[in-house]
Amino acid sequence: MVNFFQRGGAVLLALVMASMVATPAAANYSTLTSAVDWSSAITALMAVAAVIAGVLVIRKGIKFVLASLR
């Protein structure tokens, strides 16, 4: 069993080293990523998070009120 893991590790190491050698210089995607404006998407996600947080707070408040009535 140990021999299997040793061979697997050697093969994995060889594959990683080969991919590092075969990889060309990293592509520059700054022109594509700078053209994207994430402010509206971030605003929408924050609004959804605020709604979910509000629902959870209301639910907790309802449980508190019902528990105090008992």
Image (tube, rainbow, N blue to C red):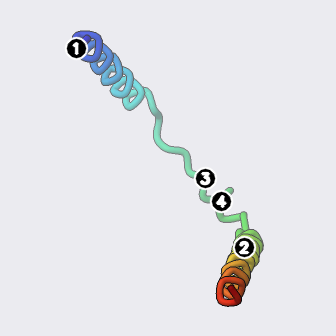
Q: What is the distance, in whole Å, between disc 3 and disc 1 at their CAs? A: 43 Å
Give the residue drawn at x 72%, y 73%. 52
Given contact means CB atoms under 8 Å apart, are the residues at marks 3 and 2 in contact? no
Q: What is the distance, in whole Å, between disc 2 and disc 4 at their CAs? A: 30 Å
Given contact means CB atoms under 8 Å apart, are the residues at marks 3 and 4 in contact? yes
Q: Which residue is mark 2?
A: 52
Q: Earlier in the sequence, mark 3 or mark 2?
A: 3
Q: Which residue is mark 4?
A: 33
Q: Which residue type carries mark 4?
A: Thr
Can the viewer see residue 46 in this picture? no
Callout in the foreground (3, 1): 1
Callout in the foreground (1, 4): 1
Q: What is the distance, in whole Å, between disc 1 and disc 4 at their CAs? A: 46 Å
Q: Is residue 36 above or below residue 17?
A: below
Q: Nearer the viewer, residue 12 or 29?
A: 12
- Bin the neighbour count of mark 4 within 10 Å (Cα to Cα): few under 14, some 14-19, many 20 and up: few
Q: Which residue type carries mark 2?
A: Ile
Given contact means CB atoms under 8 Å apart, are the residues at marks 2 and 1 in contact? no
- 6 sits left or right of 35 in the view: left
